Image (tube, rainbow, N blue to C red):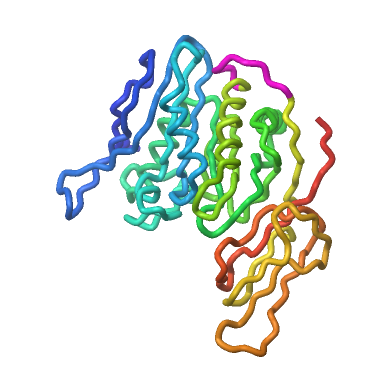
């Protein structure tokens, strides 16, 4: 396979702090020999694990970018044993446009792995992460939120893996992150995700969903910052003692956890995030916006559990996820 066209302006083996870019050539009308400059910071000191911290995998999710740009200005080499790679805006074109996907090629980076070095802009970014960054890393933390269209309880998440020893290492890192909620997550479609590539490569991988609505809150940024610090201590890159953080363990074992709309219309949520719901409870109503005198269509819970995510905008389209109900599980740790 050909080499990646992306060239880093930093030396990943160099001691100290480096602020630079992943430089991706991008010829376009506005800049014939131009490039996309994806910011990153590398902090290296001594011999130890390498941790890859990423945000902005989707460009309209902001808790990760806010927490990581702050970390990039504050993390000092003397507090590190090993290497920390910080990329706050992984899908940089999407981030600059405030969109989930890239405005250049409409690429959803988190559905594009392993990517291609001779593909679209998004495929080239995925390829560089797959073939150059993931092999360096021992631990990967990819910070997500709900973006403009979803809102989540603040949670850290892992996946059920065939390799149970690897899953146990991931779960230990998830617990160390210390989010108010922790989840073994079922993805509707895991093909092409950074998660899948990192897990396939044997890495300790943790993801998050820390809010949403296309903005941040004081509380959601605090969860991100605290969780990153705890994750670095757990990985052995930063010093510190970890006290066990209280967390509610959740599970999404099947498709019954998801409720999708079959109609376009005006959305009324009937449960709030964090509410306990029972099978058959009304989660939401969708009203016909073209006329009055028509009752709203009710959408009911397919299982018992906690309302973990909800559609955020006031209007909904057929096929949109209205609600995600996760099941509480006994914490056996």
Please state the horizontal and vertical placement of residue 4, each as a whole percent of the image: 32, 36
Q: Is residue 302 left or right of residue 20?
A: right
Please state the horizontal and vertical placement of residue 199, each as a whole percent of the image: 58, 36
Q: Is residue 151 magenta?
A: no
Q: Is the magenta stretch mostly helix, strand or loop?
A: loop
Quarter occupied by the C terminus: top right
Residue positioned 49% across, 51% down in the render:
111
Quarter occupied by the N terminus: top left
Please state the horizontal and vertical placement of residue 133, each as a whole percent of the image: 43, 30
Residue positioned 61% across, 36% down in the render:
223
Residue positioned 42% across, 55% down in the render:
99
Q: Vertically, is 45 above or below 288?
A: above
Q: Give, as a single range, the part of the protein colored magenta.
A: 235-243
Residue positioned 40% across, 53% down in the render:
98
Please state the horizontal and vertical placement of residue 73, each as a whole percent of the image: 41, 26
Question: Which one is in front, 34 or 245?
Answer: 245
Q: Vertically, is 35 above or below 215?
A: above
Let me know if residue 202 appears in the view.
no
Quarter where residue 278 is shown: bottom right
Question: Which one is in front, 101 or 265?
Answer: 265
Residue that lies at the very extreme toward the front in this rendered image: 218
């Amino acid at each position: 396979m050909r080499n990646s066209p992306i060239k880093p302006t930093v030396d990943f083996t160099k001691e100290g702090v480096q602020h630079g870019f992943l430089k991706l050539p991008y010829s376009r009308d506005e800049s014939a020999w131009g490039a996309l400059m994806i910011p990153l910071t590398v902090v290296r000191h001594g011999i130890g694990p390498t941790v890859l911290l990423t945000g902005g995998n989707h460009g309209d999710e902001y808790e990760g970018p806010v927490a990581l740009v702050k970390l990039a200005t504050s993390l000092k080499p003397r507090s590190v044993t090993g290497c920390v790679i910080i990329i706050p805006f992984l899908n940089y074109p999407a981030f600059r446009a405030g969109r989930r996907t890239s405005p250049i090629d409409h690429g959803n980076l988190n559905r594009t792995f392993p990517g291609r070095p001779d593909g679209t802009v998004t495929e080239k970014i995925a390829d560089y992460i797959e073939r150059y960054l993931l092999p360096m890393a021992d631990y990967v933390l990819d910070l997500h939120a709900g973006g403009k269209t979803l809102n989540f309880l603040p949670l850290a998440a892992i996946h059920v893996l065939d390799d149970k020893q690897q899953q146990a290492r991931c779960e230990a890192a998830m617990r160390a992150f210390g989010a108010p909620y922790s989840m073994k997550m079922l993805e509707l479609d895991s093909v092409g995700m950074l998660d899948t590539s990192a897990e396939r490569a044997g890495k300790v991988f943790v993801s998050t969903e820390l809010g949403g609505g296309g903005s941040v809150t004081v509380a959601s940024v605090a969860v991100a910052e605290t969780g990153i610090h705890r994750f670095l201590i757990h990985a052995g890159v930063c010093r510190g003692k970890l006290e066990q953080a209280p967390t509610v363990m959740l599970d999404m074992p099947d498709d019954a956890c998801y409720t999708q709309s079959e109609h376009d219309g005006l959305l009324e949520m009937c449960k709030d995030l964090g509410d306990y719901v029972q099978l058959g409870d009304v989660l939401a109503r969708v009203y016909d916006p073209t006329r009055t005198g028509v009752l709203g269509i009710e959408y009911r819970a397919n299982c018992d559990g906690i309302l973990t995510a909800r559609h955020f905008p006031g209007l909904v389209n057929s096929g949109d996820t209205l609600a995600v109900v996760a099941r509480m599980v006994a914490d056996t740790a």
